[in-house]
């Protein structure tokens, strides 16, 4: 992985953890997810149009279909993440969701995209997964009955992460869809997909805007920005490197959950720090 790609991934990790902190604070269900999807579409519309004018990308039906499929998967991702946050701690749900994603997406990158990590990078991936397990293992093994749904939703969320990571890698890497357009398309697509369900709960939308408009605005700005950074890195680096490396956000998000939200089991959920840092170095060298 190049130094530029690594810097993009690290910046994305910080931004990703921050918007998840805001999403956890809101935990507003479908109305909230729909609201920030619409706001993100509006905020980044000028950027998307500028991309079309400047880059003049050659986009066909296949590009559009891939964006629509990715939008559907992203919709499932955000709804599952919200469910996990509504039922349990951020420091439990976030590491499990983000830890499951890279394991599956790295495997998919090797099995289906023909990527061949070097020995050093492969060791980094293995060490990254080990660090993720150290952070989440005690939490999952000691989960209280009320946490079982949180773990389930987080695991399912991780599956959607793996799926959209591979889909979007194909879009930007093989089909040539500009990362900015892909991200805007998935946000706008999610807004359209969730509109029927959201409009059945207009009172919920009004309530979420009243109580959590700052969080909605923050997620709308930060979530696309974080993923645009990742998509840009994906255009030049293998997904089997990027997917695990970006999971440094697990550490940042876990610290936010245990410190800022006063969640428990802080020591158990931060144990994997050293392993993850070494893994990042190995990925950079690889």
Image: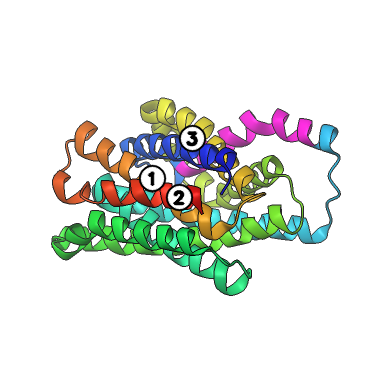
Label 1's element? helix
Who's the residue at 83% across and 44% down the image?
A: 57
Label 3's element? helix
Note whether 266 is above or below 77 in the view shown: above
Residue holding disc 3: 11
Q: Earlier in the sequence, mark 3 or mark 1?
A: 3
Q: With 226 as the anchor, is 254 left or right in this view?
A: left
User: Callout 3: few (<14), some (14-19), or many (20+) C-alpha neighbours within 10 Å?
Assistant: some
Q: Residue 233: image x %, image y %?
A: 60, 45
Residue lying furthest bottom in this view? 111
Considering depth in this image, is 260 or 217 the residue closer to the camera? 260
Who's the residue at 26% across and 38% down the image?
A: 255
Label 2's element? helix
The color scheme shown is rainbow
Q: Residue 152: image x %, image y %?
A: 31, 64
Considering depth in this image, is 127 or 143 the residue closer to the camera? 127
Note whether 44 is above or below 238 in the view shown: above
Residue holding disc 2: 245
Q: Marks 3 and 1, how far apart in space?
A: 10 Å
Q: What stretch is highlighted in magenta?
A: 33-51
Who's the residue at 42% across and 60% down the image?
A: 125
Residue holding disc 1: 248
Q: Residue 203: image x %, image y %?
A: 43, 37
User: Callout 1: few (<14), some (14-19), or many (20+) C-alpha neighbours within 10 Å?
Assistant: many
Magenta span: helix, strand or loop, mainly? Answer: helix
């Amino acid at each position: 992985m190049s130094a530029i790609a690594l810097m993009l991934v690290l910046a994305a990790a910080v931004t990703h953890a921050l918007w998840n902190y805001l999403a956890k604070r809101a935990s507003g269900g479908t109305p909230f997810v729909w609201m920030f999807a619409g706001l993100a579409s509006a905020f980044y519309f000028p950027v998307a149009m500028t991309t079309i004018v400047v880059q003049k990308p050659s986009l066909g039906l296949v590009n559009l279909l891939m964006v629509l499929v990715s939008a559907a998967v992203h919709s499932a991702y955000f709804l599952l993440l919200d469910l996990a946050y509504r039922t349990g701690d951020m420091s439990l749900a976030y590491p499990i969701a983000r830890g499951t994603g890279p394991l599956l997406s790295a495997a998919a990158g090797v099995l289906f995209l023909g990527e061949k990590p070097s020995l050093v990078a492969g060791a980094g991936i293995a060490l990254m997964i080990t660090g993720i397990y150290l952070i989440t293992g005690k939490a999952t093994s000691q989960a209280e009955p009320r946490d079982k749904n949180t773990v389930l939703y987080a695991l399912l969320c991780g599956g959607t992460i793996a799926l959209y990571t591979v889909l979007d890698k194909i879009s930007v890497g093989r089909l040539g869809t500009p990362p900015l357009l892909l991200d805007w398309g998935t946000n706008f697509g999610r807004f359209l997909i969730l509109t029927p369900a959201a409009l059945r709960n207009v009172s919920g939308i009004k309530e979420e805007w009243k109580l959590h408009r700052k969080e909605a605005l923050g997620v709308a700005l930060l979530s696309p920005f974080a993923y645009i950074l990742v998509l840009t890195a994906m255009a030049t680096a293998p997904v089997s490197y990027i997917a695990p490396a970006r999971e440094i956000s697990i550490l940042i998000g876990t610290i936010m959950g245990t410190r800022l939200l006063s969640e428990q089991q802080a020591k158990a959920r931060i144990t994997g720090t050293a392993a993850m840092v070494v893994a990042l170095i190995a990925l950079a060298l690889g």
